[in-house]
Amino acid sequence: MHFTKSDIEYLDHVRRLNIMNSISGIKSVNMIGTVSQDGVPNLAVFSSVVHLGSSPALMGFILRPKHEVIRDTYENIKETGMFTINHVHQGIIKQSHYTSAKFEADVSEFEMCNLNEEYLEGFKAPFVLESRIKIGLSFKEEIDIKSNQTTLIVGEVAHLMIPNEAVAANGYVDLEMTQNVGVSGLNRYYALNRMMDLPYARPHQLPKWE
């Protein structure tokens, strides 16, 4: 199939949404935890988490247009300055997926989706107890993307919790060991299997192509 710009614009809404959400390939899937000033925990699944830098350690995620509906995640982050990123593994796919349902602001997705909160002293945002890799971040900035009114939320890593056995001597995190999953589109989940490790690429050390 070959789609031009005009073809894409005239596709059925759902078909266009599914194609454009899956064409970028398999993405990481995470739950972002926040809490309101009133103490109501919030949890939402995202497939837009990205690494932004290692020094300082920055991560970000994309929020859809804030004017479309109330964004509890955004409001909570702006109020408290904290949020968590919690990896999804094979044992909690369904619970994670259903945090995307549009619950009322005073309803906890943790409770509704059979997940448990976990807190660190001095850090207000909730982690997901069942998650195996958890990241606590402090809000640094938001960057508006004018082309489609989305927003990049940038946070600096304050806490990083990883199982000891999943961290190699060189620092690589074994996502297969933690049974992490990836997602294509909005609701098609994939298991992760490591295929190979390759050396740092240098122009004078290219392999012999078969």
Image (cartoon, rainbow, N blue to C red):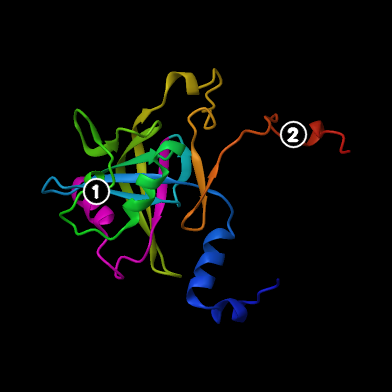
Residue stretch in magenta: 56-80
The answer to the question of whether label 2 and label 1 lie on touching residues, with beta carbons closer than 8 A, is no
**Res 81 seen here:** no
The residue located at (56%, 50%) in the rendering is 26
Numbered badge on residue 202: 2
The residue located at (49%, 23%) in the rendering is 166
Q: Where residue 91 sits in the image (x, y, percent)?
A: 42, 36
Say which quadrant the N terminus sits in. Answer: bottom right
Inspect the image, locate mark 2, and give the three-letter code of the amino acid beneath it.
Arg
Inspect the image, locate mark 1, and give the three-letter code of the amino acid beneath it.
Met
Residue bearing the label numbered 1: 112
First in residue order: circle 2 vs circle 1 = 1
Comparing 67 with 206, the one in front is: 67
- Quick check: 75 left or right of 1? left
The residue located at (13%, 48%) in the rendering is 37
Badge 1, how many Cα within 10 Å: few under 14, some, many 20+?
few
Quadrant hosting residue 121: top left
Q: Where residue 159 sits in the image (x, y, percent)?
A: 33, 30
Say which quadrant the C terminus sits in. Answer: top right
Comparing 203 with 129, the one in front is: 129
Query: Which element type, helix, strand or loop, lies under badge 2?
Result: loop
Numbered badge on residue 172: none
Q: Is residue 74 magenta?
A: yes
Q: Is residue 208 magenta?
A: no
Q: Where residue 86 sits in the image (x, y, percent)?
A: 37, 39
